[in-house]
Amino acid sequence: GQQLNQSPQSMFIQEGEDVSMNCTSSSIFNTWLWYKQDPGEGPVLLIALYKAGELTSNGRLTAQFGITRKDSFLNISASIPSDVGIYFCAGRGSSGSARQLTFGSGTQLTVLP
Amino acid sequence: ETGVTQTPRHLVMGMTNKKSLKCEQHLGHNAMYWYKQSAKKPLELMFVYNFKEQTENNSVPSRFSPECPNSSHLFLHLHTLQPEDSALYLCASSQDRRGTVSGETDTQYFGPGTRLTVL
């Protein structure tokens, strides 16, 4: 089956710093999604990517769909305390069961004042 | 407000109880999903319904029984659960585009989840 490797597992940063996290896949994906989950809540979609090489921003967040279609990264610039949470990548293949989303194990982000 | 609601938000049950989780989506989508989220593990897909038909069952034990009476509602019936079934159960919905290339309608929107504790 498809596997996603998300790194790092956790990050501790100072407020104001930039953050980068990434996901790599064992197979080609047609879609990459980035979600954020706050404690006790469901994941909320941050950015969706649909084309290889696509670079998309949402405020201070920027994500890219890798040109090989096997990786994606998420950058957060000028972090603030409310950025704290777990960030998940998710990808989707093109056929059969691969069309279901596969999720990374998440990156726990802590922003220190 | 995500457009996907789940009730109850918290549930504590004994191993002999029978309970149901409810999910409702207000987004006009035609596909709904149940996921299990355990600590330190990726989200695990349990069931998928497209156009009210179950299209995926990821080897889920029979003590979990899904029901999709219409495209807006999804239930997960629980009976004789085990303590290891304690987890956050998440519902999601999307607009399925059968036979087409992936696109914006791939995106799944999640509910807030039900935190289940089995004693």
Image: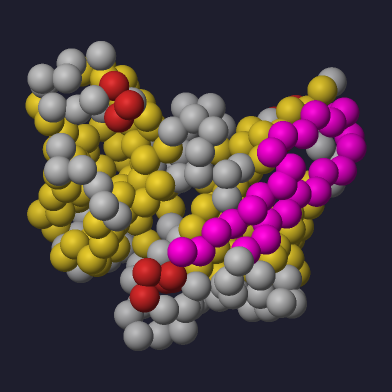
| Total number of numbered discs in the rendering | 0
**Spot occupied by residue B1 in the image (x, y as percentages of width and height):** 44, 42
What are the residue bounds of the magenta stretch?
A: A1-25
Q: Is residue A19 magenta?
A: yes
* Viewer-proximal residue among A56 and B46: B46
Q: Is residue B9 visible?
A: no
Tell me: residue B42, above or below residue B30.
above
Give the left or right position of residue A63, taking residue B62 as reference.
right
Tell me, yes or no, whether the highlighted magenta stretch contains residue A42. no
Q: Position of residue A15 (x, y in %)?
A: 86, 29
Q: Which residue appears at 26% of the width and 62% of the height? A: B56
Q: Quadrant of residue A34?
A: bottom right
Q: Quadrant of residue A82?
A: top right
For the point 73% across and 65% down, the residue is A64
Task: Tell me if A26 is positioned left or right of A67 in this view.
Answer: left
The percent position of residue B24, horizontal first and vertical second, equals 25, 46
Task: Give the prevailing secondary structure in the magenta stretch.
Answer: strand
Does residue B74 appear anywhere in the picture? Answer: yes
Viewer-nearest residue: A61 or A7 = A7
Which quadrant would the C terminus of chain B be assigned to in this image?
Answer: top left
